[in-house]
Image: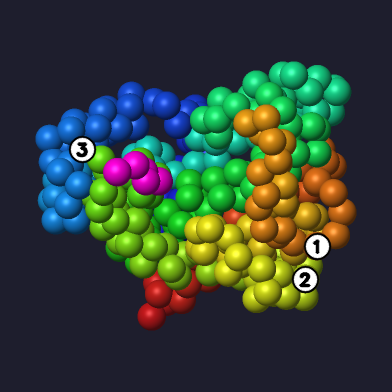
C-alpha cells in the first residue's frame, strides 16, 4: 500500500499540480499567524503551546480518519493516503520556479530569471548575475526537493499519512517562526526550530546519502564531512554540501545584494553554477526519487511476502 500510495500521489500531482500557495497552505499560514498574535509573549512556553495547537489537531485528525477508514475498507484508507500525500508532497509545489528560471537563463533573459528567483526566495535578486541566479536556484531546488518530497516520504513510510502531515506542518512552522530574530519575537520560535531539527535529523542525512549514491559519491561525502558544519543551518548544510559534491558544482559563496557583497560559506567543489548544472540538478533529484521508490517497493514486497 505504501509504494502504490506514493506512486499514485506523484502521478496525480504531475497531472494536476498543487502549487505552494494553494488554499490549504494559505489557510494554515493564516491560522499560524493568528496563533502567533495570540500567544507570542516572547517566551519559550508560549511557542510550545502555539506549536501544539497548530500541529497536533491536524495530525490527530488525519490519524483518526485513517484508522476509521481502514476499519471500513482498506481501499478507502489507501485513497486517504493518496489524498494526504497529494496535499503534503510533490515536486510541482516548487519546481515551476526552478523551471522558469532555467528557461529564462537558457534564453539569456536575466531580468526574468531574477524576478522569478526573487518571488521564490521571498527576497530581491535584482543584483544577482546569471551565475548567482543559477547557484541560488540550485540551492533552493535541493532544499525544496528534500522538504517537499524526500523528508515527507520518510515520515510517511514510518508513520503513515499522519507522519507526512507532521513533517510538512513542522517544516512550515520552522520556516515561519525560527527565522525571526527581532527582540519582540524572543524565544517564541525556539521550540519550532528545535523540534524540526530533530524530526529532520534522519531524513536530511538519508537525502544527502542518496545524492551521494546517485551522483559523485566520493566528492559528495568529502564535501559533506568538511563543509556542512560551516552553513548557518547545519541540516541544510548537509544537503547542500552533499548535493553540490554529487553534482560537481560550487554553491554557497558570496552574493551581490543589498548594495554590497554578502559572504557565505562555499559548498561543493568543481565548476561555477550555470544553466547546465541546473539541468544536472533535475537529473540528480529524479535519480534519487527512482532510488527511493525502488527501495520502498523492495521493502513493501518483503513485508507482503512475510
| Secondary structure state at the residue bearing disc 1 | loop
Decide: marks 3, 2 in contact (CB < 8 A)? Answer: no
How far apart are the alpha carbons under marks 3 and 2? 43 Å
Along the polypeptide, which appears first: circle 1 or circle 3?
Answer: 3
Q: Which residues are magenta?
A: 179-183
In the image, 281: left or right of 95?
right
In the figure, is residue 288 to the left or right of 186?
right
Q: Is residue 228 above or below residue 127?
A: below
Q: Residue sitting at 29 percent across and 43 percent down? A: 183
Q: Earlier in the sequence, mark 1 or mark 2?
A: 2
How far across and down, in percent of the image, does residue 287 sit? Answer: 68, 56
Q: Nearer the viewer, mark 1 or mark 2?
A: 1
| As drawn, 64 above or below 16 | below
Question: Residue 22 sits in which quadrant?
Answer: top left
Which circle, 3 or 2, is nearer the viewer? 3
10 Å neighbourhood of mark 1: few (<14), some, or many (≥20)? some
Residue drawn at point x = 53 percent, y = 58 percent: 232
Find residue 305 and report its horizontal and vertical position in percent.
42, 76
Mark 2 surroundings: few (<14), some (14-19) or many (≥20) residues within 10 A: many
Q: Quadrant of the C terminus?
A: bottom left
Q: Which quadrant is home to the N terminus?
A: bottom left
Q: Position of residue 302 (x, y in %)?
A: 46, 76
Provide the residue designation for mark 1: 269
Find out whether residue 56 is within the magenta segment. no
Q: Is residue 181 magenta?
A: yes
Residue under label 2: 219
Tell me, for residue 36, which label it has, or none: 3
Amino acid at each position: 500500500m505504501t509504494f502504490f500510495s506514493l506512486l499514485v500521489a506523484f502521478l496525480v500531482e504531475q497531472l494536476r499540480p498543487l502549487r505552494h500557495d494553494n488554499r490549504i497552505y494559505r489557510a494554515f499560514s493564516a491560522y499560524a499567524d493568528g496563533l502567533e498574535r495570540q500567544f507570542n509573549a516572547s517566551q519559550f512556553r508560549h511557542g510550545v503551546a502555539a506549536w501544539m495547537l497548530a500541529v497536533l489537531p491536524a495530525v490527530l485528525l488525519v490519524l483518526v480518519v485513517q484508522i476509521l477508514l481502514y476499519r471500513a475498507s482498506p481501499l478507502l484508507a489507501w485513497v486517504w493516503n493518496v489524498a494526504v500525500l497529494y496535499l503534503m508532497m510533490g515536486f510541482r509545489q516548487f519546481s515551476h520556479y526552478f523551471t522558469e528560471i532555467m528557461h529564462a537563463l537558457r534564453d539569456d533573459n536575466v531580468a526574468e530569471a531574477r524576478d522569478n528567483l526573487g518571488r521564490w526566495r521571498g527576497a530581491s535578486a535584482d543584483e544577482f548575475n546569471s551565475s548567482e541566479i543559477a547557484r541560488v536556484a540550485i540551492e533552493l531546488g535541493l532544499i525544496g526537493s528534500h522538504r517537499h518530497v524526500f523528508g515527507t516520504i520518510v515520515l510517511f513510510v514510518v508513520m503513515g499519512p499522519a507522519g507526512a502531515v507532521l513533517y510538512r506542518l513542522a517544516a512550515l512552522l520552522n520556516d515561519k517562526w525560527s527565522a525571526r530574530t527581532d527582540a519582540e519575537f524572543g524565544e517564541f520560535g525556539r521550540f519550532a526550530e528545535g523540534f524540526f531539527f530533530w524530526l529532520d535529523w534522519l531524513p536530511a542525512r538519508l537525502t544527502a546519502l542518496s545524492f551521494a549514491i546517485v551522483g559523485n559519491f566520493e566528492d559528495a561525502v568529502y564535501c559533506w564531512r568538511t563543509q556542512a558544519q560551516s552553513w548557518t543551518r547545519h541540516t541544510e548544510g548537509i544537503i547542500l554540501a552533499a548535493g553540490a559534491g554529487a553534482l560537481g558544482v560550487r554553491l554557497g559563496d558570496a552574493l551581490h545584494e543589498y548594495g554590497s557583497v554578502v559572504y557565505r560559506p562555499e559548498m561543493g567543489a568543481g565548476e561555477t553554477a550555470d544553466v547546465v548544472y541546473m539541468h544536472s540538478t533535475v537529473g540528480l533529484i529524479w535519480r534519487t526519487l527512482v532510488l527511493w521508490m525502488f527501495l520502498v517497493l523492495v521493502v513493501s514486497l518483503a513485508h507482503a511476502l512475510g
